[in-house]
Image: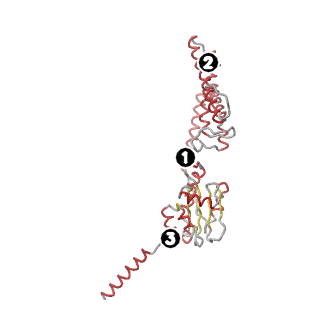
Amino acid sequence: MRLGCVVALFCSVLVSARTELDPQTPKEQLIAFAAAGDGVIALDAAKFALLTVKDRTWSASIEFTARSTKWGCGACAAFAPEWRSVAKAWAKAPKQHMHDHFFATFDFDADGSKGQAIFQQLGMKSAPMVVVYPKDGNAQLAKFDLSDFSQPIYLDTPPTRIPLSRPFDYAFYLTRSGAFLGALALTYTAIRLRILQNRWIWATASLAFSMVMASGYMFARIRGAPWAGRGGQMVAPGAQSMYAGEVRLVAPIYILLGLAFYILATIVPQYPVSRAGQRIVVYSSSLLIFFGYSLLIVLFRIKMRSYPYRIL
């Protein structure tokens, strides 16, 4: 009896030791990688080869991206949380399908030259891009560029539809409601105090609005211009391009110039003080105009390198 118990215990130890020594199957490794990444596998060259092996029994959706700031890919940063939310929603899929499809992300800088070689091999010329590897290794890959990304089509690509639902955005509606109520309160106060009937307030607001628009604000908004260049340049070269940061540089100069002209044209003649004080105001306004136009020409020479003239 004791001998039988010893033999059974010895056999169970051998079986457990054999199980620990046996390597995981590729699918088990991928399941572990996905669990460690909260549903998204962070790929390098080795994991990419494992995920896209030709005789696979699973399908995969891979996001090819370049999130490093040196590439200046704003779309990559904007798409990243959307990709994570889709992958997280896949965890709610039926159990019989959940481990038949994997979500992964391959960053351009993830594995040095090996990773970049994979991008070149797949002909990636833009990012972010989603590539779907079907279960059949011989089937054609499905590529979704961000500009052509269609959620209803993509959500039907895995073995079953992704149960994606966005939570109610309380912060969005609370902030909008607060802003609306604040605007109503300000409007009511302005009407009671007759602030809106003051022509100087309307003149100041109109001039400030005109100066901001003349600085290129609408141009930058319509074209979706980035804040700055890849190297941190605030001024874009050429007359047909512009960074959003240029508006913040040019608008204050325009406002100062407008203020200086207003002082010379209105305040100095209508509100005379002593002759010495009047001269100080005139000289100060003239210097402000001189240096303001000098700064504008400096910025213009940065945009147009061949422009030959300057003030300072």
Q: Residue furthest right?
A: 240
Pick the residue in front: 220 or 183: 220
The image quadrant of residue 244 is top right
In 3D space, how far apart are the residues under numbered discs 2 and 3 (Cα atoms)? 80 Å
Q: Are marks 1 and 3 in contact (CB under 8 Å)?
A: no
Q: Which residue is mark 1?
A: 174
Residue 108's x, y, as percent? 57, 56
Label 2 vs label 1, nearer the camera:
2
- Mark 3 is surrounded, within 10 Å at the Cα level, by few (under 14), some (14 to 19) or many (20 or more) other residues, namely few
Q: Amino acid at mark 2?
A: Ile
Specify whether 81 is left or right of 216: left
Q: Which residue is mark 3?
A: 28
Q: Are marks 2 and 1 in contact (CB under 8 Å)?
A: no
Residue 170's x, y, as percent? 54, 50
Label 2 vs label 3, nearer the camera:
3
Report if residue 91 is visible in the image: no
Q: Amino acid at mark 3?
A: Glu
